[in-house]
Amino acid sequence: MRKLTYIIVPVIILVGFGVWLNIIKIETPSPLPVVVISNFDECEKADNPIMESYPRRCRFGDVTFTENIGDELDKMNLIRVNNPRPNQVISSPLIIEGEARGFWFFEASFPVVLTDWDGLIIAQGIATANGDWMTENFVPFTAKLEFKNPTYKNNGALILRKDNPSGLPEHDDALEIPIIFKNIN
């Protein structure tokens, strides 16, 4: 009888311990999924706070992500675009409006290019001065681009190139504005 007690008591203890571990396992909530955020768009989509600045900033924990607005701030003393604005949703025909210093033009115009996410040119045209371009002051301009939406990814870039009739690389310049295409399937 004593031998049986020595066997039954440890078995009961082990079974009880196993049941207790199972109960703890069931009551313990599973860990939350790990959220990986690596840029402004992902941070914004995760409903993190957006700072009211330009460019906008989004905070995730101890990390701050800045919205991509192209090189608009670097070029604002040379060329300014009123439409479209960085990260604006666009559709065809796209009307481009803004102002550029007179030396951005040659013969009252400069080239404009629209690219898809991969840099493939999907439209190009000419921006035309709406006033006397023979000045160093800002001159209003307009352009119109017609295009077919890309079939893959909805982001791209609008590139406004300084006209450079000399062809010398030291006279090249451009403003690149990130855009979003409307109704990409």
Image (cartoon, helix red, strand yellow):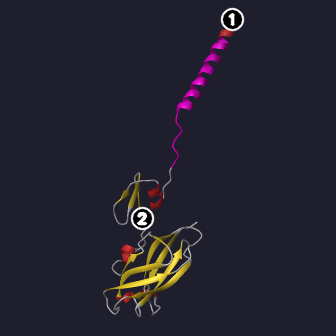
Residue 131 lies left or right of residue 43; in this view the side is left
Q: Residue drawn at (68%, 9%), measured in percent from left and top?
A: 3
Residue topped by disc 1? 1
Nearest the eye: 42 or 124: 124
Q: Main secondary structure of the magenta part?
A: helix
Q: Position of residue 145 (x, y in %)?
A: 49, 81
The quarter of the picture where residue 164 lies is bottom left
Identify the mark nearer the N-term, 1 or 2.
1
Residue topped by disc 2? 67
The single residue placed furthest to the left in the displayed view is: 137
Q: Is residue 39 visible?
A: no
- For the residues labelled 1 and 2, the Cα–Cα distance comes to 78 Å
Element type at marker 2?
A: loop
Q: Amino acid at mark 2?
A: Glu
Q: Which residues are magenta?
A: 6-34
Q: Position of residue 155 (x, y in %)?
A: 51, 69
Q: Residue drawn at (44%, 83%), measured in percent from left and top?
A: 143
Classify the position of the C terminus by image quarter: bottom right
User: How many residues crowd mark 2 within 10 Å: few (<14), some (14–19), many (20+)?
Assistant: some
